[in-house]
Image: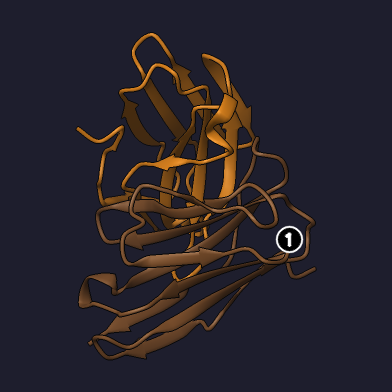
C-alpha cells in the first residue's frame, strides 16, 4: 500500500549541477503535482499534469522542468541548480481533479 | 496580497485546550476548503474537507466556512499532544482548476502535556 513514493529523500547539490526527482503513484490517479515548501511560505505549486503526456506550469515554474511519460510517474528536473532552490519538494496525486490530494513524504534538497 | 492568508502562529497550548486555527482568502471563486495536517518530516495528510458554508464535525475537529466573509476556521476540542503538527488550510477553485490547491502558510501547533 505504497501510495505516493518520492526518490531520493535527501540530496545535496552544488550550484550549477542538475538532478531529477522521481515521483511514483500506484493509485492509478490521473492528476499529479509538484509543490515546494519553504518556511513561512506554505506549499507552492511548481508544475502539474492532468494525464499521461501532459504538463502545465504552476505558480513557481522557473528553473524546473517536468515530464509525465507514464501515468504512474511524474519527474521534476533541475537543469542548473541554484541556492534559491533549496527546499523540501512534495509530489501529490489526485484521482480526477476533485477532492483529496495524496502527498508523498517529501524530498529535501540543499543547493550549496 | 496572497490569495490565502493563514495566522502563522506558532501556537503552544496545554493538553485539553480548545484550539482555533484561521485562514482568510481573497478569491470568491474558491469552492472547496480543506485542512491538512503535517507531522514533522512527513507529507501533508487531509484532515477535513468541505465545500459549503457552515460547520462540519469529525470527532474532536470542526471545520467552519463563511463564504460571505471569505473566512475558514478549524477548531480542535480537547487537544492532545498527538495533535502537535503543522496545520495547513488549502483551497480549490473547482471547475477547471484541475485539483490545484492554494495553501496558507501553515500554523505550527504544539500541545504540551
Crowd class of label 1 (few under 14; some 14 to 19; many from 20; radius 10 Å): many
Residue B108 seen anywhere in this rendered image of the structure: no
Please identify the residue farthest to the front as the structure is shown: A53
**Chain of the residue under the numbered disc 1 shown in the image:** A
Q: Secondary structure at mark 1?
A: loop
- Is B103 situated left or right of A31 in this image? left
Chain B appears what colour? orange
Q: According to the image, label 1 marks what residue?
A: A71
Q: Which quarter of the rendering shows the C terminus of chain A? A: bottom left
Res B61 → quadrant: top right
Q: Which chain is brown?
A: A
Q: Position of residue B80 (x, y in %)?
A: 50, 52
Q: Position of residue B28 (x, y in %)?
A: 39, 16
Q: Position of residue B79 (x, y in %)?
A: 47, 46
Please identify the residue farthest to the top as the structure is shown: B68
Q: Residue at x 80, y 68 (%)?
A: A1
Amino acid at each position: 500500500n505504497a501510495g505516493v513514493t518520492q526518490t531520493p529523500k535527501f540530496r545535496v547539490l552544488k550550484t550549477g549541477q542538475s538532478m531529477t526527482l522521481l515521483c511514483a503513484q500506484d493509485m492509478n490517479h490521473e492528476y499529479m503535482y509538484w509543490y515546494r515548501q519553504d518556511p513561512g511560505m506554505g506549499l507552492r505549486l511548481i508544475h502539474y499534469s492532468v494525464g499521461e503526456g501532459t504538463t502545465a506550469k504552476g505558480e513557481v515554474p522557473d528553473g524546473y522542468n517536468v515530464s509525465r511519460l507514464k501515468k504512474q510517474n511524474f519527474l521534476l528536473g533541475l537543469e542548473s541548480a541554484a541556492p534559491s532552490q533549496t527546499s523540501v519538494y512534495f509530489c501529490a496525486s489526485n484521482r480526477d481533479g476533485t477532492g483529496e490530494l495524496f502527498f508523498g513524504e517529501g524530498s529535501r534538497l540543499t543547493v550549496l | 496580497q496572497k490569495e490565502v492568508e493563514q495566522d502563522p502562529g506558532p501556537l503552544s497550548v496545554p493538553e485539553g485546550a480548545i484550539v482555533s486555527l484561521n485562514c482568510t482568502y481573497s478569491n470568491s471563486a474558491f469552492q472547496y476548503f480543506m485542512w491538512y495536517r503535517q507531522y514533522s518530516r512527513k507529507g501533508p495528510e487531509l484532515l477535513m474537507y468541505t465545500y459549503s458554508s457552515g460547520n462540519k464535525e469529525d470527532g474532536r475537529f470542526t471545520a467552519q466556512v463563511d463564504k460571505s466573509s471569505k473566512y475558514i476556521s478549524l477548531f480542535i476540542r480537547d487537544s492532545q499532544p498527538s495533535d502537535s503538527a503543522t496545520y495547513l488550510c488549502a483551497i480549490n477553485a473547482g471547475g477547471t482548476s484541475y485539483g490545484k490547491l492554494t495553501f496558507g502558510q501553515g500554523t505550527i501547533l504544539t500541545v504540551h502535556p
